[in-house]
Image (cartoon, helix red, strand yellow):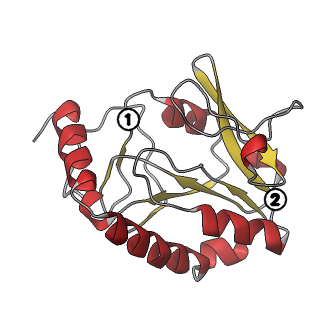
């Protein structure tokens, strides 16, 4: 089995190998797939991410959640931890870029917790996934730490088909996702 560093490199190369048109088409198809799922239809809150460096473009799905009145939350990194804050609009002034260039929710207030909802859905980015729900992120551990504290949320990985691997190295702290959309 490859190391985590090797898999990250392979996954990044595979993503870079996709044309912009392929990424756009695959993102649209994936958003349709998620929108048509029971997970999305039954969700009373959506915890998601703003796409970064070649990730699936879920912005149309985020927009749709806002139109449908589904509370939308995006992550903000604070030190070594990640917290989710409510977003009422995806305007750029509401999502200033952090030190890595990722759009994060602006404003103040207390972070949200999935436990505040009965059927929260979290869309989780990553570099590599298995069909069984194993995930390899960029290496910061933000999602693993967050999910270890917030167990009452249905998690769904979001990936291009080229990001699906047969197996990934796992560690005891790795959280297995409930589903992977690809």
Q: Residue at x 83, y 49 (%)?
A: 116
Q: Residue at x 69, y 45 (%)?
A: 74
Q: Nearer the viewer, residue 70 or 100?
A: 100
Could you say where residue 76 lies in the image, as x and y percent from the top left?
Answer: 67, 33
Label ID, residue 138: 1
Identify the residue position indicated by label 2 in the image. 71
> Would you say 21 lies left or right of 46 here?
left
Q: Quadrant of the N terminus?
A: top left
Occupied quadrant, residue 96 = top right
Mark 1 is surrounded, within 10 Å at the Cα level, by few (under 14), some (14 to 19) or many (20 or more) other residues, namely: some
Q: Quadrant of the C terminus?
A: bottom left
Q: Is residue 52 above or below residue 33?
A: above
Q: Nearer the viewer, residue 74 or 145?
A: 74
Inter-mark Cα distance, 1 to 2: 27 Å
Q: Residue at x 35, y 71 (%)?
A: 21
* Residue found farthest to the bottom: 36
Earlier residue among tags 1 and 2: 2
Q: Nearer the viewer, residue 45 or 177?
A: 45
- SS assignment at label 1: loop
Q: Residue at x 69, y 78 (%)?
A: 41
Q: Is residue 85 above or below residue 79?
A: below
Occupied quadrant, residue 88 = bottom right
Could you say where residue 167 lies in the image, as x and y percent from the top left?
Answer: 20, 52
* Residue found farthest to the right: 109
Could you say where residue 173 lies in the image, as x and y percent from the top left?
Answer: 42, 31
> Would you say 104 lies left or right of 36 here?
right
């Amino acid at each position: 089995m490859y190391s985590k560093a090797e898999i990250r490199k392979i996954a990044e190369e595979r993503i870079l190998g996709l044309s912009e048109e392929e990424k756009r088409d695959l993102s649209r198809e994936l958003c349709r797939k998620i929108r048509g799922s029971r997970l999305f239809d039954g969700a009373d809150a959506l915890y998601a991410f703003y796409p970064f460096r070649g990730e699936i473009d879920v912005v149309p799905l985020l927009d749709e959640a806002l139109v449908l009145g589904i509370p939308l939350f995006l992550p903000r990194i604070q030190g070594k931890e990640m917290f989710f804050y409510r977003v009422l609009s995806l305007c750029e002034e509401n999502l200033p870029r952090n030190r890595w260039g990722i759009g994060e929710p602006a404003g103040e207030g207390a972070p949200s917790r999935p436990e505040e909802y009965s059927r929260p859905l979290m869309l989780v980015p990553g570099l590599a996934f298995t069909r069984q729900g194993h995930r390899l992120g960029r290496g910061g551990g933000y999602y693993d730490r967050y999910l270890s504290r917030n167990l009452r949320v249905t998690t769904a990985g979001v990936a291009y088909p080229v990001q699906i691997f047969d197996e990934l190295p796992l560690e005891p702290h790795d959280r297995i996702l409930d589903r992977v959309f690809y």
